[in-house]
Structure formats: structure tokens, C-alpha cells
Image (cartoon, rainbow, N blue to C red):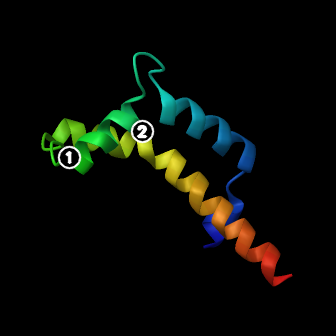
Amino acid sequence: MRWLDRLPLLPLIVGALLLGLAPFSPEPHLLRDLRWLIAGELTQPEDLFDLVFHGALPLLLILKLVRLGAIRRRT
């Protein structure tokens, strides 16, 4: 998990917000894709790629924040 510790937090936050919420109108792709995934309608390969593309940085941010919380609890 050292690679996760080396990721800078501020660029990760900015990237997660911009990529996770893009496009801002009419609704973010990530929310639409998650809704489709839950409904079982996410079947096209390009839709799966889109979910991974828009969800990668928000997922890394969540992992980084969980890791930081775990490290702070230990100390």
C-alpha cells in the first residue's frame, strides 16, 4: 500500500471531483452508470469502460482517505 501513501491528496481530490462529476449537466456519468449497474442495464463494453474511467479517481480517493484514517488511529 505504499503506492497509495505516495499519492498526493490535493490533486487526487481535484481529479476525483472533476472526473467523477463530469459532465456536470444534465447528470454526472458516474451516477448514471451506477444507476444502470444497479438496475442491471450496464451491458455495453463502452459503458463498462465509462464506469471504470469516471470511477477510478473517486475510488482511489476513498481508499486513500480510509488508509489515512487507519494510519491516524494507529498513532
Which dot marks residue 62?
Answer: none
Q: Residue at x 40, y 16 (%)?
A: 26
| Label located before the other in sequence (1 or 2) | 1
Where does label 1 land, which residue? 39
Q: Label 1, label 2: how many angstroms apart (C-alpha)?
A: 18 Å
- Dot 1 crowding, Cα within 10 Å, few <14, some 14–19, many 20+: few
Query: Which of 47/33 is in front?
Result: 33
Q: Residue at x 67, y 60 (%)?
A: 65
Mark 1 lies on a secondary structure that is helix
- Dot 2 crowding, Cα within 10 Å, few <14, some 14–19, many 20+: many
Give percent across and percent down for residue 63. 58, 62
Please tell me whether mark 1 or mark 2 is closer to you in this view. 1
Q: Are marks 1 and 2 in contact (CB under 8 Å)?
A: no
Write down the quadrant of residue 46 in the picture: top left
Give percent across and percent down for residue 49. 27, 42
Q: What's under tag 2, amino acid-wise?
A: His
Write down the quadrant of residue 29 in the picture: top left
Where does label 2 land, which residue? 54
Q: Residue at x 70, y 61 (%)?
A: 6
Q: Is residue 3 left or right of residue 23?
A: right
Q: Residue at x 53, y 47 (%)?
A: 58
Mark 2 lies on a secondary structure that is helix
Query: As displayed, is residue 15 above or below residue 55?
Result: above
Write down the quadrant of residue 45 in the picture: top left
Query: As displayed, is residue 5 above or below residue 23?
Result: below
Query: As displayed, is residue 25 above or below residue 66?
Result: above
Q: What's under tag 1, amino acid-wise?
A: Ala
Give percent across and percent down for residue 35. 30, 41
Query: Which of 11/25 is in front?
Result: 25
